Amino acid sequence: MNLPKSASVVVIGGGVMGASTAYHLAERGIKDVLLLEKEEFFGQGATGRCAGGVRYQFATEINIRLSQASLPMLERFAEELGQEVDYRQCGYLFLLDNDKDIQTFRHNVELQHKLGVQTEWLDGDEIRRRLPDMRLDDVQAATFNAQDGLCDPNGVVMGYINAAARLGAQCLTQVEVTGLDVQDGVILGVHTNQGDIETPLVVNAAGPWAGQLGRLAGIEIPITPVRRQMLTTTALPQLPADFPFVIDFAKSLYFHREGDGLLTGMSNPGQAPGLDQNVDPDWELVHMEHAIQRLPLLERAGIVSHWAGLYEVTPDAHPIFGATSVDGFFVVAGFSGHGFMHGPVSGKLISEIILDGAASTVDVSMLDLARFAEKRPIVEYNVI
C-alpha cells in the first residue's frame, strides 16, 4: 500500500456517499483526492447491507427533491460511468391500515403531485386485486409509484470508485482513521493505522460511524447507529414477475423480489442504538411471523441468507450536509435509511459546497449541522 503523505481532500468512508463524493470532487478537477475505507472491500458497511430500494415517495419537499435529482443519475449510470447497476423500476407500494397513516399519506401524495411526482392512490379493493397472494383484509388504502424500484448497491459503489480512480483519485481499503489533527479549530491532517496524512479538507462520509468520527474532531454530530436486519428466501415460483416493493407501513415490514425468491425485513421499534451487526434470532422469528401473516406463501420458503446492517439516524430523519465548527471538516451523513438512493446526488452536492461555497444542484442549506442546536428540525414521516 502506498499511503500518500498529503492530499488536497481526504474522504472518510468507502460506501456510496464517500465513493460519490470522491468521484464528484475528482470530476471537478481535484487531482489528489484520497478516499479511505477501513474494511477490506468498498461498500461493505451500511451501503452493502441495505435493501437496495430507491424511491420518490417521501413526506418532505427536500427528500423528494433529492430523489428527483438522484434517481435519474442512477438511470444514466451505465451510460455515464460505464457500470451496470441493474436499476429496476418495479414500483413501491405502501400498505396503509389505519386512519392516521391514511391522512398523512394523503398529504404526502398531494405534496408529491405538486412537485411532479405522480404517485397513485389506491383503495383496498384495488390493492387486493393487484396482490391476490397477500392477506390484505385490513388494508384500507395504499400509495404506488411505478418509477420507484431497486438498484445494485455494489455496482453503484464500484462504478464511482473506478470512475474516481480514472480521474486520478486514490481509493484505499484497510486504512482506518484513528485520529484527526485539529489545531485552533482548523483541520490539518488525518491519523490512520497506516500512517499520517496532511490535508486541509476532510469529508466525513462514515455513515453510522460519522458520530464517532466527529468526536475525533471535537464535534458532536447527532447521528445514531441502529441495527436493521433482513433475509432472502428460496424460490417462490408462485410470485408474479411484476411483484412490487411492498411496505406494510405500520409494521415497518417490507418485501421485494430477489432472484427467484424474496428479500424481506422488518424494523424492530425496540432496537437499542449501537454498532452490533449480528442477526438477532429472536427478532427474526417475530419478523417471520408477521411476514407469513401478510404473505402466506412464505410458509413454503426456506432462508437462503440473512444479515444485519446499520441505519445512521438523525433526530429528524434527514441528512446532514456541509461545514462544521472545525474549519475544513465537512459532513455528508445521517440519511436515516435512505442514503443509498440519495448517494449519487449527495456526493455532487457536498463537492459543490466545498468548491463553490454552496450546493446548486439542490438547495440543501436547511440540512446543515447547526439546525439541531438552533432547533429547526425537518421531520420525515415516511421512514421504515
Image (cartoon, grey):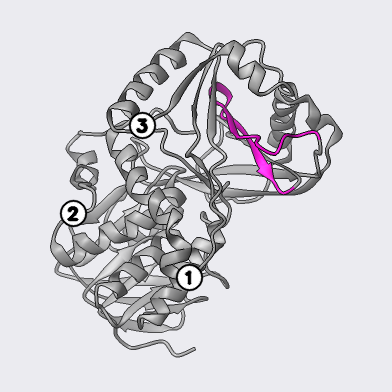
Indicate which disc, 3 or 2, sits on the residue closer to the N terminus: 2
Question: Residue 194 at what x, y percent from top left?
Answer: 45, 83
Amino acid at the residue labelled 1: Gly
Residue 216 lies, with reference to residue 170, above or below; the image says above
Please report the residue visible at 45 percent of the width from the left and 54 percent of the height from the top. 75
Q: What stretch is highlighted in magenta?
A: 238-259
Q: Is residue 251 visible?
A: yes
Mark sitting on residue 82: 1
Q: Do the residues labelled 2 and 1 touch (CB within 8 Å)?
A: no
Kindly state the secondary structure of the residue where label 2 is placed. loop
Front residue of 191 and 24: 24
Q: Earlier in the sequence, mark 2 or mark 1?
A: 1
Q: What residue lies at 71% left-to-right and 18% top-to-bottom?
A: 135
The residue wearing badge 3 is 380
Marks 1 and 3, Cα distance to the nearest angstrom? 34 Å
- Left or right for 183, reference 123: left
**Front-most of residues 231 and 247:** 247
* Residue indicated by mark 2: 360
State which mark lies toward you, 2 or 1.
Answer: 1
Mark 3 to mark 2: distance in Å? 22 Å
What's under tag 2, amino acid-wise?
Ser
Foreground tag (1 vs 3): 1
